[in-house]
Amino acid sequence: MKVSIITPFYKGNAYMRQYAEMIQRVEQHLAYNNTEDELEVVLVNDSPDVEIIIPQGAPTVKSLRILQNETNQGIHKSRIRGLEESKGDYVMFLDQDDVLAEQAITSLLKEAKSHPEAVVVANALLEQKNSSELWYRTDYHKERVGDYRTYLTIGTQIISPGQCLIPRNLIPDIWKEKCCTVNGSDDYYLWLLLLQQGVSFRYLDEPLYIHRYTAENLSADTTKTDASVYEFVTFLQEAKALPEKDIELLLRMIRYKDAFRRGNLITKAVETIKHLDLFMENLRFKLGTKTPYGFNR
């Protein structure tokens, strides 16, 4: 089996030493423990005015290929470019500032071989400004990794596709053809499509992925991620890829949370009364997951 790690690059030379060192550790672990399988790494340079430079003294990544976008395409289209030009049976979409444990591909691939028609999702360490915590800390949360309704009423349960090993043959055509131009939620779009089609998400209780805290983390900017959701919702509606009632529920959740975050106490109370069912589901979720983060999660 071959695994393709696809990473969009955007003015990310500051991360290239860390990235090369990480990939070397992952390669070596896979080669030592799993000699019949292989890894390829595809960096898609989406910053045409910047050359990718791996610093002097950084390890040579044997499996690395670099693709060059002629113009800036955004994260989603860059992921699709890498997908089209890679050969892996399984795909991981990794961000340039993310970090994998050295055993990440070895462990994920072992689980994937036992469940070849599933997306395998590993636990993750989520860095905050002054702390680092496991993302899935309770059984309640772990059980919702692949729960379709949770993605409609609470939000995405996967920090990054860098936690996931995805069988190439399961990636829906609509996700490859209708690309988000607004960065932030193309992975949420993919999970919704897969879950609605009945694809199983297998949870692997091992922290194999680290989401680094930087001031540039797009996922922390709900205004941008919401705009990306509104964009992919139009694709879902045009293609009738999700039932209309599910799309309406998704939109109601996004609008309610946006109004709640922006509003004063009176606005929060009014919006909560209007969407009491969503408030109760989100309250149960926060109590069940013991998440310390804000209402967006």
Image (tube, rainbow, N blue to C red):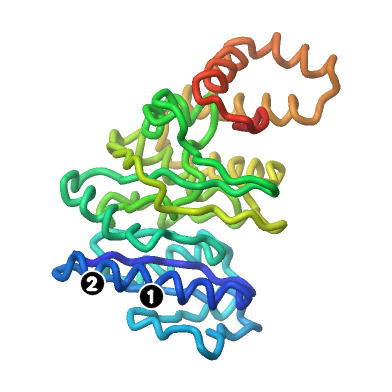
Mark positioned earlier in the residue sequence (2 or 1): 1
x then y, percent, for residue 250: 54, 29
Name the residue located 29 percent from the left edge and 67 percent from the top edge: 29
- Say which residue appears at 69% left-offset and 47% top-offset: 130
- Write down the residue under mark 1: 24
Placement of 22 over or under 145, stated as above or below: below
Identify the residue at image location x=51%, y=68%: 8
**56 lies above or below 87:** below
Under circle 2, the secondary element is helix
The residue to which callout 2 is attached is 31
> Is residue 237 at all visible to an observer of this figure?
no
- Is residue 52 depicted above or below 134 in this figure? below
Q: Nearer the viewer, residue 81 or 144?
A: 144
Give the crowd class for mark 1: few <14, some 14-19, many >=20 residues within 10 Å: some
Q: Residue at x 28, y 49 (%)?
A: 170
Do tag 2 and tag 1 residues touch (Cβ < 8 Å)? Answer: no
- Where does residue 101 sit, x and y in percent of width and height? 40, 59
Q: Look at label 2 and name its amino acid.
A: Ala
- Left or right: residue 213 compared with residue 200: right
Vertical position of residue 189 compared to residue 208: above or below: above
> Which one is nearer the viewer's eye here, 147 or 242?
147
Count of all numbered marks drawn on residues in the image: 2
Query: Label 1 amino acid?
Result: Gln
Label for residue 200?
A: none
Quadrant assignment for the C terminus: top right
Cα–Cα gap, marks 2 and 1: 10 Å
Residue 75, image x, y percentages: 55, 61
Q: Between 87 and 102, which is closer to the camera in this rendering? A: 102
- 4 vs 245, left or right, is left
